[in-house]
Image (cartoon, helix red, strand yellow):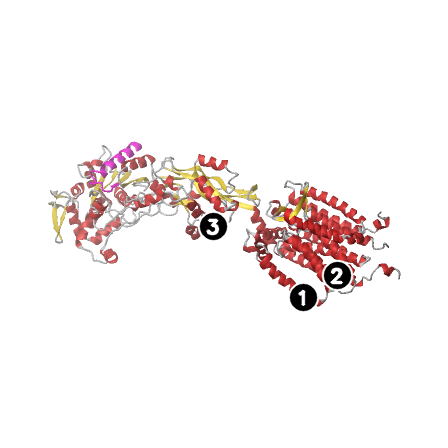
């Protein structure tokens, strides 16, 4: 079923970057959790292997086919998200997990892939150079549904990741200046309304502590401060692998998940930070550059949207751990421990590879 | 051309992708810039913060130097003591914590709260002592529930222990916790809030010798405050052991002799000024003060009308009474207003400045010379001497002979007493001096007040025939600074040696030839002394205290007559006649001294 010519067209360089990032991440996970029960590093390696298999299995199906059925994926996942509001397993206060036998998955991560597919599907059908308001409204609606559902879990971090997908799709579709201004105003109004109506107290507190981290060092500002101490104390060369005091003595919160980047900063120093960010940048730029290698508009959207969501998560996570952004619980793609997020990212890359390797194929 | 059917025109896509990448690249660089600022520019600051996070310093308390008597008997010792401290950082719920700790330790919640409030400014991981002197039962109770109470820790500390309790309590003093104000004053280097320092007595006077240097332990701890490993350790330097001139046996006997009374006893080596015993009664048990709290006993002691905390020997001010007649005799002889042969007639009473003044012996002593006057403590004789001398010369001699200024003993808080003069009267009382007061002062009454230690030093001066010692307690280590450079000296005393001999003859007769001090006589020990019985300043005050009006009872003396080896001064408040109460006490001590040294 899968043509040998297709295999030859797989972007092995991108696959290489993907693995390099993941293994770098697994190494840091090992450093920050080897003294904890639970074998996090090993489990992450297993997840990497499983995700890699999923990536290749996903390649078998032509993305055209995937797009055709995208509305069903989307619909099914939205249904799951609705059901989860009532039955989800609560972890850290958010009902964002479902338990299948002994392991948990986060459907909201997979919803990202579904939204990418469905946005690409609908946006690629409109073939004008600039976007029509009908498409914009449709895109807005498609994004709003998972956003609201996930925000209600409540998992604001993951919910936020849906927004750049809409923005990316709009940009790629050709957004007029006027529309940008209107959107900015709408965002501002939504922000004000959200602050007053939707945000919970702890979320407000997190936002204010980004501005004043020293104000409450024992409370919400504690995590940010400890993370900055970890990174800052690393200096140029870092304290050495497995030798970060902030991480090894557990001053740093969520060391193997959301704050894995702080461990890089503390143990490997500025050199390590530059290396990690360089790897990330190469990874996302490779994805973005693949957009032009698509045979059709739908492929362009797929690639571009995958690039957007990965980039968004990297930028937000790093800003978060250095205190530029509120702590919203967005993991660092490929680095942070977590199977669902890893799988979602691998499937995203799988989409990119899918588009890229089928660019010369005539159907 | 055919290709274009399948492949759309993607030039716009390329443009938009490139722009996106540009923005993304810029954002990555921006992040890198911020990280560079934190990691490279502010590295030092964050490095220090991370070190402060992981390294915890704790004080290793130095054991205090021991205090020994002259023969090596330990008067102040160190014992291990257990204390319970709270670590606020480990409290799940602060209020609940206090509640259950209050139950566990049996300390009221309010007390705990107040206690902890004092240390508000401390970092939250630092243990705050909330109860000390735990007994073993309490220690096991806390240790058994260690997992339940992560906020409570038990640690040991060397604690001061006074094996003989109240014995010599006034000399040794006691320890108390530093107050925040004292810490701020900077007087106690290296000491912080909650540390114990010498508050009175030798403990305070020789604090710098006794205190030693605290050490510290540096531990690596995790975010839960658990110690992971020890990083470094500076051992504490124990305080220096000091040896006092006190003789344990004399001190104990002196204390026993005062039991049930109020008064003071000083036993002095006249040559060196060494204090062999210094007792003040009532006394207290300093062991009870070595707690970090203000116990009820403390309040009780402060408020007791007989002031057990006061060291009467150096802080009690009393009229010297007839004891002052020795100084009067010396002054009279030296100034030439009388000689040894001068006689006066005592009819039991006399009229001076239009007022009657009486002798204590209402029958009258008849005609007597100086020696006899000292022997019988005749008031009339010294009224006449005083009248001839005048108040200015009396004051001059009193000061020369050791009154009106501190003796310089190495104890804190010594009072200087008062030798009144007309100038003093104008200054302090805003009233002029009455000639009649001169007569009162002549027999050690009136505004003249002295401390028992001053009387003792004065007696030593007489025993030394003019050489005045500085009383001191510290024998070892010998320190060069300050007052005690060894032997007594004729510090400003111009009275001739033979003048002293004349007065000493009277003092010898006073004890050994049926004088007022006969109760102090000791076969073969040639005690020379003088008694005193001082009228109370006001009768009303005595009534207020609910006492029978009795005079204060004095005896001061030395032995032997030639080459004196010991001076003993006894004061018993409301003790009645000096010869009846104080003199027999002195005799006991002379006896003990002789039996120890022969």
Residue B120 marker: 3
Question: What chain is tagged by disc 3?
Answer: B
State which tag comes first along the sequence, 2 or 1.
2
Q: How far apart are marks 2 and 3 (CA)?
A: 58 Å
**Which of the two marks, 2 or 3, is nearer to us in this view?**
2
Q: Distance between the residues labelled 2 and 1?
A: 17 Å
In the rendering, at what x and y percent does residue A249 appear? 60, 45
Residue most extreme to the bottom: A178
Residue most extreme to the right: B2
Against B124, residue A308 (above or below) is below
SS at badge 2: helix
> Which segment is the magenta one?
B570-598
Residue A182 marker: 1
Badge 1: few (under 14), some or many (20 or more) residues near its Cα, within 10 Å? few
In the rendering, at what x and y percent does residue B20 appear? 73, 60
Residue A238 marker: none
Q: How far apart are marks 3 and 1 (CA)?
A: 53 Å
Provide the residue designation for mark 2: A172
Q: Residue at x 41, y 39 (%)?
A: B160
């Amino acid at each position: 079923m899968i043509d040998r010519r297709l295999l030859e067209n797989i972007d092995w360089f991108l696959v290489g970057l993907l693995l390099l990032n993941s293994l770098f991440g697994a190494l840091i996970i090992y450093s920050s959790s080897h003294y904890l029960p639970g074998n996090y590093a090993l489990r992450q390696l297993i997840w990497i292997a499983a995700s890699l298999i999923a990536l290749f299995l996903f390649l078998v199906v032509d993305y055209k086919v995937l797009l055709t059925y995208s509305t069903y994926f989307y619909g099914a996942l939205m249904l799951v998200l609705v059901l989860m509001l009532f039955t989800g397993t609560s972890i850290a206060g958010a009902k964002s997990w479902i338990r299948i036998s002994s392991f948990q998955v986060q459907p909201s991560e997979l919803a990202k892939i579904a939204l990418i597919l469905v946005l690409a599907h609908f946006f690629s059908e409109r073939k004008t150079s600039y976007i029509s308001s009908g498409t914009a409204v449709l895109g807005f609606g498609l994004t709003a549904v998972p956003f609201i559902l996930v925000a209600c879990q409540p998992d604001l971090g993951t919910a936020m990741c849906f927004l750049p997908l809409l923005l990316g799709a709009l940009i790629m579709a050709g957004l007029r200046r006027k529309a940008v201004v209107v959107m900015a105003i709408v965002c501002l109004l939504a922000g004000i309304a959200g602050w007053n109506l939707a945000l919970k107290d702890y979320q407000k507190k997190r936002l204010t502590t980004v501005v004043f981290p020293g104000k409450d060092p024992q409370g919400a500002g504690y995590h940010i401060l400890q993370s900055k101490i970890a990174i800052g104390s690393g200096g140029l060369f870092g304290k050495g692998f497995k030798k970060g005091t902030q991480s090894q003595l557990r001053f740093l919160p969520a060391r193997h998940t959301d704050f894995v980047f702080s461990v890089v900063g503390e143990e490997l120093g500025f050199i390590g930070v530059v290396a990690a960010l360089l790897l990330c940048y190469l990874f996302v730029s490779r994805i973005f550059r693949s957009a032009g290698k698509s045979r059709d508009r739908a492929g362009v959207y797929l690639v571009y949207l995958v690039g957007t969501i990965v980039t968004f998560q990297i930028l937000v996570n790093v800003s978060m751990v250095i205190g530029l952004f509120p702590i919203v619980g967005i993991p660092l793609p490929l680095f942070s421990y977590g199977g669902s997020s890893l799988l979602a990212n691998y499937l995203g890359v799988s989409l990119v590879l899918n588009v890229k390797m089928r660019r010369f194929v005539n159907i | 051309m055919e290709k274009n059917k399948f492949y759309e025109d993607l030039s716009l896509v390329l443009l938009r992708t490139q722009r996106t990448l540009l923005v993304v690249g810029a954002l990555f660089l921006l992040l890198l810039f911020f990280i560079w600022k934190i990691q490279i520019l502010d590295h030092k600051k964050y490095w220090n913060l991370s070190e402060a996070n992981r390294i915890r310093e704790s004080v290793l308390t130095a054991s205090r130097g021991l205090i020994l008597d002259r023969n090596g008997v330990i008067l102040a010792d160190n014992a291990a003591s257990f204390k319970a401290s709270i670590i606020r950082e480990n409290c799940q719920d602060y209020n609940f914590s206090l509640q259950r700790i209050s139950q566990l330790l049996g300390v009221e919640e309010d007390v705990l709260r107040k206690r902890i409030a004092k240390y508000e400014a401390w970092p939250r991981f630092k243990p705050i002592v909330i109860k000390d002197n735990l007994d073993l039962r309490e220690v096991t109770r806390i240790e058994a529930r260690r997992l339940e109470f992560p906020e409570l820790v038990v640690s040991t500390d060397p604690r001061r222990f006074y094996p003989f309790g109240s014995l010599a309590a006034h000399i040794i003093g006691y320890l108390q916790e530093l107050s925040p104000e004292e810490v701020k004053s900077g007087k106690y280097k290296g000491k912080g809030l909650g540390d114990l320092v010498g508050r009175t007595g030798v403990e305070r006077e020789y604090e710098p010798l006794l205190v030693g240097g605290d050490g510290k332990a540096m531990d690596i701890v995790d975010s839960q405050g658990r110690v992971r490993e020890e990083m470094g350790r500076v051992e504490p330097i124990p305080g220096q052991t000091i040896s006092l001139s006190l003789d344990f046996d004399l001190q104990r006997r002196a204390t026993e002799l005062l039991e049930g009374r109020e008064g003071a006893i000083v036993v002095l080596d006249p040559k060196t000024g060494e204090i062999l015993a210094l007792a003040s009664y009532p006394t207290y048990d300093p062991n009870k003060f070595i707690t970090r709290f203000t116990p009820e006993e403390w309040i009780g002691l402060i408020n007791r009308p007989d002031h057990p905390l006061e060291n009467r020997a150096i802080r009690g001010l009393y009229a010297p009474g007839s004891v002052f007649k020795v100084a009067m005799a010396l002054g009279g002889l030296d100034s030439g207003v009388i000689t040894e042969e001068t006689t006066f007639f005592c009819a039991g009473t006399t009229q001076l400045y239009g007022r009657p003044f009486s002798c204590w012996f209402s029958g009258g002593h008849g005609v007597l010379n100086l020696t006899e006057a000292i022997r019988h403590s005749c008031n009339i004789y010294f009224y006449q001497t005083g009248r001839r001398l005048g108040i200015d010369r009396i004051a001059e001699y009193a000061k020369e002979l050791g009154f009106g200024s501190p003796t310089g003993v190495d104890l804190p808080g010594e009072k200087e007493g008062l030798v009144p003069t007309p100038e003093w009267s104008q200054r302090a009382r805003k009233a002029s001096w009455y000639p009649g007061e001169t007569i009162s002062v002549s027999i050690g009454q009136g505004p003249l007040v002295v401390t028992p230690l001053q009387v003792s030093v004065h007696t030593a001066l007489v025993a030394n025939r003019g050489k005045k010692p500085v009383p001191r307690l510290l024998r070892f280590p010998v320190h060069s600074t300050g007052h005690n450079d060894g032997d007594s000296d004729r510090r400003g005393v111009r009275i001739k040696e033979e003048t002293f001999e004349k007065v000493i003859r009277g003092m010898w007769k006073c004890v050994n030839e049926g004088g007022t001090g006969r109760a102090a006589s000791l076969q073969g020990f040639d005690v020379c002394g003088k008694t005193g019985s001082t009228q109370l300043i006001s009768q009303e005050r005595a009534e207020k205290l609910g006492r029978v009006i009795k005079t204060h009872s004095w005896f001061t003396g030395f032995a032997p007559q030639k080459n004196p080896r010991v001076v003993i001064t006894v004061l018993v408040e409301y003790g009645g006649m000096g010869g009846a109460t104080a003199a027999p006490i002195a005799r006991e001590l002379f006896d003990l001294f002789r039996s120890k040294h022969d």
